[in-house]
Each structure stands twice: as structure tokens, then as C-alpha cells.
Image (cartoon, rainbow, N blue to C red):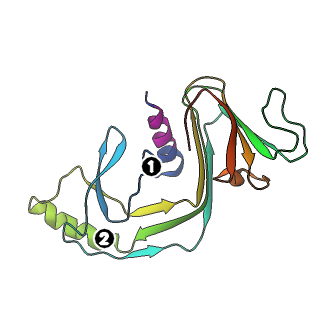
Amino acid sequence: MALYTNYVNSIRDEFGYVATWLPSQQLAVGDVCLLDDGQVRRRTTLESKGIAFATRLSDVETTFTYSSSDSVEVSLKAEGEPPPLGSALQLADAGAVITFGTAGSVYFALNDCTSTELEDVDNVGRQILELHKNGDWNEDYFVVIEVVQAGGATIAISKGANGSLELTANAGINQLANLAGNVSVRAESKLGFRA
């Protein structure tokens, strides 16, 4: 099984969202897409199909953290604390050690997440049904009705059992959310992907 499959499935199963792969892929509300082997592929837009729509932005910032159950452990280390045995972290480092018990295990932390949503889904749906009735809509298309944008992210997927990722903090780490984008890699082992 491909590494991205674990990541995409984890986000869908845990949060109910369809994730993009690579995580840097940009989508917008109103994009019309297909799923290709679990990956989102943009094909057109509602605007190109002649469908007008409005969006709304959530002004509430959210944090998401996730780790594969029973196979990922995260240990935070404060500046001045002794590092875990065998760790590349130094006494002066604030950081974290993430260990992956099995291949394909997923860890991610996303912070400062905002959401943009389609304002009137029902109205857009009626227009899509009209296009479909006229043979102008592929039945396999889906419309992006919400996009969650992260201000910072740390994502890791193991490619082997007993993988690890050691991160040093660019600012103090006092909670898992601070691992999102505020870190540098000190050491890694058996990782298939990290961002």
C-alpha cells in the first residue's frame, strides 16, 4: 500500500475530510475534481461550468493533531531537560521525539487552521443537477465545498517499523500543537515522508 493512502485514509476516517496529496496541493472552494486512486485531481471549476457561488470564511482558528492509534508515541522535551536515551536532541534543545511502531503510521499537527466554505450548497446542487440532466456533468465529479488551510504543519509517515523523527523547536514546545511548522529536523529514521 502506498504511503499517501495511510495519510489520506487517516484524515478521512478521523476528521471526515478528503485530504490532498501532496499536502501542498492547492484546492479552492468551487473546484470540480475527480478521485484518482484516492488522490484528488482538479478537472475544472464551478465558474467554468457557469455556476455562480459565494463563499464564507470562518474567523475561528483551529488546531488538529493526529497520530495512528497505538503505533505512534510523541515525547516532548523542554529546554534544559535531559534528552531521551539514544536521542540526537541536546540538553539545550526544546523539542520532541516521535516514534512509529509500525510501517505506514501517520503523525500530523496542523495549527492556525481556517476554513472557507461554499455559502449555498443547495443552490449549487440544483444547478449541478440541471447540468447533469443536460449531459454536461460527469457523474464522478465532486465539488470542493470547504477548504481548511493550515498556518503551520508537521506531517510524518513511517516507511518501516520502529521509525523515528526528532524535532527541535524554533520556539518553546509546551503542547503538541506547537509541533506544527515551528520545528527543525534533528534526526530521522525509517520515514517515508515528512513535511
Q: Find out whether residue 8 is within the magenta segment.
A: yes
Residue at 35% over, 74% down: 120
Residue 158 on image: x %, y %:
58, 31
Number of the front mark, 2 or 1: 1
Residue drawn at the location 42% of the way across and 52% of the way down: 25
Q: Which one is nearer the viewer's eye here, 137 or 159?
A: 159
Residue identified by numbered label 1: 19
Whole-percent x and y of residue 4?
45, 37
Could you say which is closer to the camera, residue 103 or residue 142? 103
- Point out the image quarter for the N terminus: top left
Of the two numbered discs 2 and 1 on the same chain, state the one appearing first in sequence.
1
Q: Residue at x 28, y 73 (%)?
A: 123
Q: Residues within 10 Å of mark 1 (few under 14, many from 20)?
A: many
Residue interval drawn in magenta: 3-10
Instruction: Examine the residues drawn in magenta and state their main secondary structure.
Output: helix
Q: Amino acid at mark 2?
A: Asp
Q: Which mark is residue 126?
A: none
Q: Quadrant of residue 39 in the image? A: top left
Q: Is residue 165 visible?
A: no
Query: Which residue is at the front of the view, 29 or 189?
Result: 189
Q: Is residue 56 above or below residue 145?
A: below
Taking the image as shown, residue 26 lies to the left or right of residue 90, namely: left
Residue at the extreme top? 161
* Amino acid at circle 1: Ala
Residue pointed to by mark 2? 122
Question: In percent of the image, x 27 and y 70: which residue is there?
Answer: 124
User: Which image quarter holds the C terminus?
Assistant: top right
Task: Where is residue 150? Give x, y as percent.
Answer: 55, 59
Locate residue 32 relative to residue 65 in the image: left or right.
left
- Judge whether residue 135 is colored magenta: no
